[in-house]
Image (cartoon, rainbow, N blue to C red):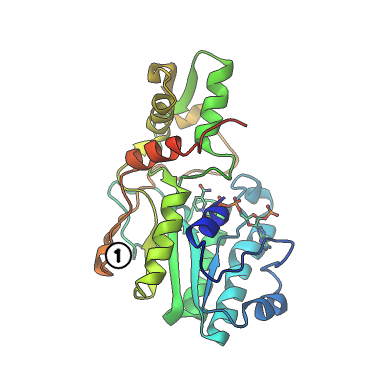
Amino acid sequence: MLGRDLQDALAGRDVTAVDRGELDITDLAAVREAVAGYDVIINAAAYTAVDAAEENEAAAYLVNAIGPRNLAIGAAFVGAKLVQISTDYVFDGAGSAPYVEDTAIDPINAYGRTKAAGEQFVLTEHPAGSYIVRTAWLYGAHGPNFGRTMLTLAAGRDTVSVVADQFGQPTWTVDLAAQIVALLDADAPAGIYHGTNAGKTSWFGFAQAVFESAGLDPERVEPTDSTKFVRPAARPAYSVLGHDAWAAAGLTPMRDWRDALAAAARHGAFELS
Ligand SMILES: NC(=O)c1ccc[n+]([C@@H]2O[C@H](COP(=O)([O-])OP(=O)(O)OC[C@H]3O[C@@H](n4cnc5c(N)ncnc54)[C@H](OP(=O)(O)O)[C@@H]3O)[C@@H](O)[C@H]2O)c1
């Protein structure tokens, strides 16, 4: 999902985009060969099935920890910058104020543990040339996104129940892709950045905004709580990320999630195929 929008954000530049069939990031020899001759490597690949990771942590670790480790080794060897996309799930979600970039990580599920291990490998193997860009609640035209799920449900029933006790920042992949390009163009200092749209809402608020963007009555979305939607992997209750690192690097943080959502809707990100 993010990888496809990155390709658009980088259009016109000398870019090679590879999928799993062309490069398996868990294969160090293949990674070493693939990165030769490049100045920048962006890793948008991951094992992203959060619930499945509970039963398949070793498989998730291979992609989410060993994969970035391999890319960091390769990037350090050829002197390239590496952008590693990470997640709000490295935090425990017990906070009540936006997480600053250097907050101690403490994941509460298998996916989060594997992504946290990936961050640590990158920071160990290639600290001076890596960006960790943590994102959250991503939606984009090239994924099975939450907005599309809501509109599919809306087409088949009167009301939809959505949890109102988990807070975060819905983030449009187009905005994140542009922010990653801006980070690289600015030659910003290596380190950790939080790549989420600004503001804060719940999944309930996100769903209501999606309904509104489609001209549907937001009152058709009903609030519920996480106890009604128990899933294999625990979810952080509070996933709001702070954006101080952007300003410190002379960059503008990403816009408010509501403005991004309106633009995404205009661009057809929630259109049903
Ligand atoms: N989606 C979110 O809400 C969210 C939230 C926080 C952070 N993130 C992070 O943001 C990044 C992008 O997420 P996304 O939602 O765009 O992911 P996505 O749509 O699930 O895409 C992940 C891609 O990685 C590929 N992949 C898996 N294993 C691979 C391997 N061994 N070698 C090479 N490629 C491999 C997958 O290929 P196959 O299709 O063949 O499996 C897929 O194309 C990830 O780092 C993710 O952890 C996402």
Say which of 163 and 21 sits in front.
21
Say whether mark 1 is within 8 Å of ligand 1. Answer: no
Q: Indicate left or right for 232 with 194 as reference.
A: right
- Which residue is outermost to the front? 12
The x and y percentages for residue 1 are: 57, 50
The residue depicted at 72 percent of the width and 66 percent of the height is 22
Quadrant of the rendered image holding ligand 1: bottom right
Residue 261 visible, this orientation: yes
The x and y percentages for residue 240 are: 35, 48
Relative to 51, is 159 above or below? above
Say which of 208 and 269 sits in front.
269
Which residue type does callout 1 highlight? Ala
Q: Which residue is mark 1?
A: 245
Residue 91 visible, this orientation: no
The x and y percentages for residue 61 are: 63, 62
The x and y percentages for residue 26 are: 68, 69
Helix or strand or loop: what does disc 1 sit on?
A: helix
Say which of 64 and 21 sits in front.
21
The residue depicted at 43 percent of the width and 64 percent of the height is 181
